Image (cartoon, rainbow, N blue to C red):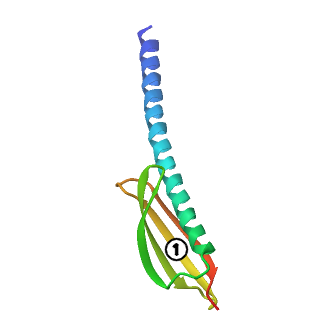
């Protein structure tokens, strides 16, 4: 009887640890998904602007989902001379897993 109780208690502890790990992973995934939404919003702004962005690095802050997000945008030439390669990196305002990187391509101005 005591052996069965010991096995049951070990199983219950394992389930509690699994629940804690699931909650931590859920928060991490939510933060990463929100960072990707911010990166996509910035990409849409760049792609729909009539003027192509200047080459080089720029950055700023965006507010989305009630959080501040820092972003950097690096615009470089792609192997094709008429195409710009735009890399957008978004990070959360606090240390944590909220980070996303998105690369898009855009035609340069004629």
Tell which residue pokes out farthest to the top in this image.
1
Q: Is residue 93 left or right of residue 52?
A: left
- Give residue 28's position: percent from left, percent from top: 46, 48
Residue labelled with disc 1 = 87
Looking at the rendered image, the quarter that the C terminus falls into is bottom right
Looking at the rendered image, the quarter that the N terminus falls into is top left
Q: Nearer the viewer, residue 25 or 5?
A: 25
| Res 98 quadrant in image | bottom left
Residue at 61 percent across and 86 percent down: it is: 108
Label 1: few (<14), some (14–19) or many (≥20) C-alpha neighbours in 10 Å: some
Q: Nearer the viewer, residue 45 or 20?
A: 45
Q: Is residue 14 above or below residue 4?
A: below
Q: Is residue 47 above or below residue 8?
A: below
Residue at 46 percent across and 44 percent down: it is: 27
How many numbered tags mark residues here? 1
- Give residue 5's position: percent from left, percent from top: 43, 13
Tell which residue pokes out farthest to the front in this image.
50
Residue at 45 percent across and 22 percent down: it is: 12
Residue at 47 percent across and 32 percent down: it is: 19
Helix, strand or loop status at disc 1: strand
| Res 91 quadrant in image | bottom left
Q: Is residue 70 left or right of residue 87?
A: left
- Give residue 89's position: percent from left, percent from top: 47, 67
Q: Is residue 79 left or right of residue 14?
A: right
Tell which residue pokes out farthest to the left in this image.
95
Q: Nearer the viewer, residue 39 or 8?
A: 39
- Give residue 61's position: percent from left, percent from top: 41, 64
């Amino acid at each position: 009887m005591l052996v069965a109780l010991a096995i049951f208690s070990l199983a219950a502890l394992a389930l509690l640890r699994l629940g804690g790990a699931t909650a931590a992973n859920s928060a991490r995934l939510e933060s990463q998904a929100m960072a990707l939404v911010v990166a996509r919003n910035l990409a849409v702004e760049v792609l729909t602007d009539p003027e192509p962005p200047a080459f080089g690095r720029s950055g700023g802050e965006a507010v989305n989902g009630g959080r501040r997000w820092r972003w950097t945008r690096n615009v470089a030439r792609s192997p094709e001379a008429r195409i710009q390669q735009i890399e957008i990196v978004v990070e959360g305002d606090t240390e944590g897993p909220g980070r996303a990187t998105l690369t898009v391509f855009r035609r340069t101005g004629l």
